[in-house]
Amino acid sequence: MSEIFELCDELGPEKVIHLQNVQAGLRAILVVDNTAAGPTIGGVRMAPDVTLEECTGLARAMTLKNAAAGLPHGGGKAVIAADPTMPAAAKQTLMRAFAQAIRLFDDYVPGPDMGTNETCMGWVSDEINRAVGLPRVLGGIPLDEIGATGYGLAAAAEVAQDFCDLSLDGARVAIQGFGAVGQHAAEFLTNKGAKLVAVSDSQGSLMDPVGLPLSELREMKRAGRSVTVLNRGKVLPDPAAVIGADCDILIPAARPGAIHEGNADSIKSRLILEGANIPASPEIEARLHARQVLVVPDFIANAGGVICASVEYHGGSEAQAMQTIAAKIRHNTAAVLRMTCEQQTTPRQAALNLSHERVRDAMAMRRDFD
Ligand code: NAD
């Protein structure tokens, strides 16, 4: 049997499609993993070295994330093998050719991912009237501008505080990565009474146990400067130093693998909210769990963006998106943390169990083909 079937299991993928348009220079792959809960939503990744395995893995991650978020959507993903820094005119031609190539696969709704953005989704929508993450002028909800993911992280924190004997009021927060996710998480958590005591960006870490001024830090970033330039507190050249900061809540919101063998034992926080995707391996998370550090896993805590995209797809407003994010993330965080206690497992395993159960339940509603 062809090795392509080695990528299949009981959940999917339902379709793996190779797309090529020689004239437009388009070489792409579409994976529709599982449509039991509804049409799939997933980003379009553009990079020169994308692979079938990567696309299949990312499509499955979207199936589980959408199920964990309780959305009426399955998971899908597309990759385009190209350099995303190409001139805008060439990129427009390529995105329009991609849109035409997926026109008939209406169980896949594309969104932005690495190498594509809202403008790209505007071109896709112009061709096939089907995309999320659109520019505001086309009815899109700009998720990074409104802080969808940071808002969701704060909602997860509100629920998690009761599971780790913590009060958000006065809780000390450390954030690695001060971009769209990190800045908004800081804003929404400090609005709930928390205190920002450490931040980092790619240039280094800044710590002050007395508390850091959020608006000044954001002003720094808006001006294109590093948080370390702020003349305040202690500056450390290592961007990863923030991981070991004296704090109650740690939010990795930068890159995958930020918490690893070399720094996991230095963590002093009681609660970790995973803003970035896969900031720690399941093994490292299990080690933290054994030390009674509560880790709310990425696909539960950082689902604000995809929930926002789903609300946009169904024609909802920005206010409805925020309401839905808070309601769904609170509900799902509580469900996962309760299951963690009941099943005596890690939060990640409980979250995976919850997602698989929801996908299987949705599949059971579908017509049987035997
Ligand atoms: P961003 O580009 O706006 O910000 C990233 C920040 O991280 C920048 O401040 C950058 O200086 C900093 N950074 C980079 N390398 C660093 C390092 N080694 N140490 C410390 N800081 C570092 O990105 P974002 O949209 O805020 O996303 C952050 C992470 O969250 C990414 O991994 C992304 O995949 C994930 N994520 C984002 C969303 C979303 O809605 N934007 C949703 C889910 C997951």
Image (tube, grey):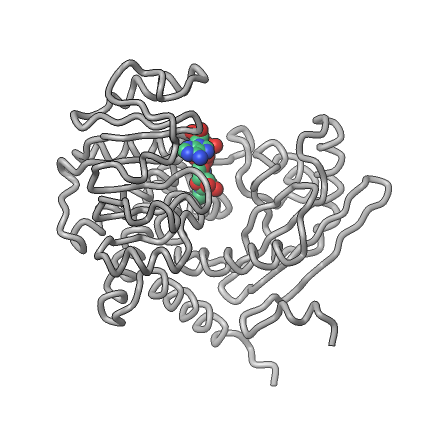
Residue at x-position 60% and y-position 53%: 77
- How many labels were placed on the picture? 0
Counting from the top left corner in percent of width and height, residue 238 is at: 38, 30
Image quarter of residue 196:
top left
Q: Residue furthest bottom?
A: 370
Q: Locate residue 198, reporting x and y percent.
A: 27, 30
Furthest-right residue in this view:
23
Indicate the quadrant containing the C terminus: top left, top right, bottom left or bottom right: bottom right
Could you tell me residue 51's position as x and y percent? 67, 53
> Could you tell me which quadrant the N terminus lies in?
bottom right
- Residue at 38 percent across and 42 percent down: it is 321
Image height check: is 122 above or below 62? Answer: above
Kindly indicate the quadrant of the structure image that contains residue 194.
top left
Residue 205, position as x, y percentages in the image: 34, 28
What residue is shown at x 33% (from left), y 65% (from top)? 350
Of residues 62 and 72, the one nearer the viewer is 62
Quadrant observed for ligand 1 in the rendered image: top left
Residue 144 seen by the camera: no
Q: Nearer the viewer, residue 62 or 326?
A: 62
Q: Residue at x 38, y 51 (%)?
A: 261
Residue 286 placement: quadrant: bottom left
